[in-house]
Image (tube, rainbow, N blue to C red):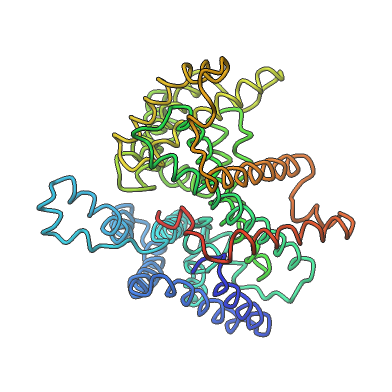
């Protein structure tokens, strides 16, 4: 079930009314029922697997709390990861062995359960925290089940820690007008980012990458930079809606993005982008490998392995492995050169931002391309055609419509995309200077507030058609 559909609006409204009309365990039961219904709507066949994972990790919590055995924990975690490894990577491994083996194993019929990467990581974090003694094993199966399945963040995060979410789940919250208004503002902002900005950009990017074999390098570069904004608005739009829905229900989810495209280094970018996942890999992979405590060479190796695994987590394809690897390598370079996020002069800040923005967006080519050959071809065309095309544009040897299709829908959608991008950048600048958007808007005068509300609502209805667009990008991870 998608956030930008009437089905979700109905489910959320009914759930909110029922949740605030109940107390204690009944309230948790209402939220759990809504969460399971939400998941079953789009992934009914995987409900038994989902429930089995909840029961298994719930019981294992008591085991790892009582037996502080590292080998036992490793075995339990391996079994927890087993469904994820099978559904996500077994078809890819079969395809690498050969097409005959792929067909014989029936790999084409294996689908990926929605959100399996996210709720598996959340369960593993819980088990490790219990083993470390940072978290007590949860006694209530109802509370634990809701912790794993809480519907706003179930299928695409943020990945919550038990210490953050479990305590909130157990508390009762009365209806709070101010909190509800702030939640609705977050939902409106997230909906705008998804249906107006990300979905319009998606049409342009799809057109660009479908012409990868013949498109001009500058055309491909424009499409690549647009994809950087598409994935940001798509994923940040999802988590913003998730935070808004959870806030209305009295639960605060962690902020998953902190204006990442304002970063002055790639290291800083990964502290601001998909924060819950970056911290997960830091706490449960990088630090256990030794972190930065075991010499510079080993620290660089640990950093590279962490980002390589992060790339593979995103998808079973060589493109994701390369994407993770190149990000790991640039972080190692920054580490060796002692490039930090703090920049003293304006020139340093501008240069740092520009290099970060260019690198991150060019790396997205591996993330977006279907195959490694496609990604390498696109990058080759970008670098081969860029300077000659720019020279041709300046000297009027090349017309703008020779590199960009002149079809009406493409140009109209491109215009909408650029308008949306301008709004998102303005939104980002506002937050960096004034504070959190959902709080600061409450200080505006009523005319300005309601103008904004009606604008966001009109955009959602006119351009989103409440569900006519595609899924969120991170649903497939």
Q: How many marks?
A: 0
The one nearer the camera, 35 or 400, is: 400
Q: Position of residue 412 (x, y in %)?
A: 59, 46
Q: Quadrant of residue 168?
A: bottom right
Name the residue at 76% across, 43% down: 430
The one nearer the camera, 46 or 135, is: 46
Q: Is residue 466 above or below residue 443?
A: below
Q: Is residue 171 visible?
A: yes
The one nearer the camera, 406 or 120, is: 406
Q: For this view, does 189 lie left or right of residue 230?
A: right
Q: For this view, does 123 lie left or right of residue 443?
A: left
Could you tell me which quadrant the C terminus lies in?
bottom left
Q: Is residue 128 above or below residue 35?
A: above
Q: Position of residue 47 (x, y in %)?
A: 37, 74
Q: Position of residue 404 (x, y in %)?
A: 50, 34
Q: For this view, does 327 lie left or right of residue 3?
A: left
Q: Is residue 135 above or below residue 11?
A: above
Name the residue at 39% across, 47% down: 314
Name the residue at 88% across, 60% down: 446
Q: Is residue 292 visible?
A: no
Q: Position of residue 109 (x, y in %)?
A: 23, 63
The one nearer the camera, 4 or 44, is: 4
């Amino acid at each position: 079930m998608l956030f930008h559909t009437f089905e979700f609006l109905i489910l959320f409204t009914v759930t909110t009314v029922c949740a605030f009309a109940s107390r204690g365990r009944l309230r948790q039961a209402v939220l759990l029922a809504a969460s399971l219904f939400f998941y079953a709507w789009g992934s009914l066949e995987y409900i038994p697997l989902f429930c089995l994972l909840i029961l298994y990790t719930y019981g294992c919590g008591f085991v790892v709390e009582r037996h502080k055995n590292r080998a036992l924990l490793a075995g339990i975690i391996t079994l927890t990861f087993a469904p994820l490894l099978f559904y996500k990577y077994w078809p890819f491994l079969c395809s690498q062995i050969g097409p005959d083996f792929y067909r014989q194993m029936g790999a084409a019929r294996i689908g990926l359960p929605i959100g399996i990467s996210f709720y598996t990581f959340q369960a593993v974090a819980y088990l490790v925290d219990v083993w470390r003694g940072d978290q007590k094993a949860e006694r209530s199966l109802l509370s634990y089940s809701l912790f794993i399945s809480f519907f706003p963040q179930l299928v695409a995060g943020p990945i919550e820690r038990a210490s953050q979410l479990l305590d909130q789940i157990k508390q009762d919250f009365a209806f709070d007008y101010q909190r509800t208004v702030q939640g609705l503002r977050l939902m409106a902002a997230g909906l705008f980012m998804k249906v107006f900005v990300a979905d319009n950009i998606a049409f342009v990017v799809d057109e660009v990458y479908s012409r990868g074999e013949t498109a001009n390098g500058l055309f491909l570069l424009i499409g690549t930079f647009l994809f950087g904004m598409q994935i940001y608005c798509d994923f940040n739009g999802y988590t913003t809606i998730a935070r808004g829905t959870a806030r209305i229900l009295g639960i605060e989810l962690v902020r998953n993005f902190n204006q990442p495209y304002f970063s002055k280094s790639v290291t800083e970018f990964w502290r601001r982008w998909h924060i819950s996942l970056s911290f997960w890999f830091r706490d449960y992979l990088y630090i256990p490998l030794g972190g930065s405590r075991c010499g510079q060479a080993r620290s660089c190796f640990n950093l590279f392995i962490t980002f390589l695994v992060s790339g593979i987590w995103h998808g079973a394809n060589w493109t994701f492995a390369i994407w993770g690897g190149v990000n790991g390598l640039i972080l190692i370079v920054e580490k060796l050169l002692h490039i930090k996020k703090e920049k003293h002069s304006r020139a340093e800040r501008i240069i740092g931002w520009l290099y970060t923005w260019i690198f991150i967006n060019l790396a997205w080519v591996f993330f977006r391309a279907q195959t490694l050959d496609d990604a390498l071809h696109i990058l080759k065309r970008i670098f081969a055609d860029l300077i000659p095309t720019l020279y041709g544009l300046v000297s009027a040897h090349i017309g703008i419509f020779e590199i960009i299709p002149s079809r009406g829908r493409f140009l109209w959608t491109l215009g909408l995309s650029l308008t949306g991008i301008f709004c998102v950048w303005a939104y980002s600048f506002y937050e960096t200077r004034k504070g959190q958007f959902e709080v600061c808007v409450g200080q505006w005068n009523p005319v300005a507030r309601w103008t904004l509300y009606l604008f966001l609502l009109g955009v959602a209805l006119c351009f989103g058609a409440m569900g006519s667009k595609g899924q969120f990008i991170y649903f497939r991870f």
